[in-house]
Amino acid sequence: MGRSGSDALVPWLAERLGVKLLARRPLGGGCIHSAWRLELEGGGCLFAKTNRAEALALLEAEADGLAALAAVADPSRLTVPQPLALGLVGEQAVLVLPWLELEAGGRNVADWERFGASLAGLHQRSLAAAAAPHDRGDGSFGWGRDNVIGTTPQGNGWCRDWGRFFAERRLAPQLALLARSGPALAGAEALLERVPAWLSGHGAVPALVHGDLWSGNAGLCGERLGALFDPAVHRADREVDLAMARLFGGFPPRFFAGYERAWPLPAGHQQRRPLYNLYHLLNHANLFGGAYRQQAQQTIEVLLGQGLDGGA
């Protein structure tokens, strides 16, 4: 972060959290925000994300999602870091979170199995009550505020029909955005017409989902707990989290086994997985271009070629 922002961070942290900042060390891995380890007087540390002031809305959406997940997570089984401070510091937007000591490459079979079961528990508990002040909890799909997927706006609102929601509020905006940067993907309109019927027959219920659950947004931390962070929350078919968890490197197999033992997925989830992951391929095509556009086109062709019936 710039010098003026760094200088202003010291009194800001003292006022907001009553801590004295001794040092800040940059961390790698982030492609949207800058990430920092904040070392405090007394030996503790915190985690911070910073960005330009106009990116404050992105950090606000992240803080909102973390609070919603924590409201339904079992803290004895799942760690969801809660926002400690959020705001503008000089010309920088800043979000401060607890420090998580994540296991480097942790692949313990039992721990990952527990993690999968814990996610199933979160999905199940979220059905019982609203998770946030703007969460309806009335059987609708969506969310009470728009947020982001990466840096791409993710429009939400509410819809009682899951197939319509996924077609109109997830796939259609991504396809339209991609068409503005190049040729429209072949078969896109036909796909959108068929999605509501394809998703109508397997009994999807509006669970609170992480929404961006790839391996870079989760891990194992202290006391062998699973940890979730960087969400794009909304109420959706729980299968969207399990589908994305197989993209971009994926989670270990025992994670999925643990989930299945705790709350088995309905028949046909393997066939729906490419459809759900098309959303993320389209988003990556919009964010990064390259081979993601071709992958999205191939996925559309496969989906249209094989079709899905409502109960598949």
Image (cartoon, rainbow, N blue to C red):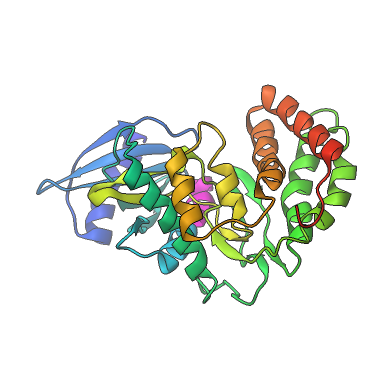
Residue 129, horizontal then vertical, whole percent: 52, 76
Identify the magenta region.
53-62
Q: Residue lying farthest left?
A: 42
Q: Residue at (46%, 39%) from the top-left corner? A: 253
Left or right relative to 70: residue 176: right
Residue 114, horizontal then vertical, whole percent: 36, 52
Q: How many marks?
A: 0
Residue 125, horizontal then vertical, whole percent: 48, 70
Secondary structure mostly taken by the magenta-highlighted segment of the chain: helix
Q: Nearer the viewer, residue 221 or 262?
A: 262
Residue 44, horizontal then vertical, whole percent: 16, 48
- Specify whether residue 24 is in view: yes
Q: Residue at (35%, 41%) from the top-left corner? A: 109
On screen, residue 296 above or below 46: above
Q: Residue lying farthest top?
A: 290
Q: Residue at (90%, 44%) from the top-left corner? A: 190
Q: Nearer the viewer, residue 22 or 139?
A: 139
Q: Is residue 171 magenta?
A: no
Q: Nearer the viewer, residue 246 or 164?
A: 246
Q: Residue at (38%, 45%) from the top-left corner? A: 112
- Specify whether residue 89 is in view: no
Q: Nearer the viewer, residue 190 or 84?
A: 190
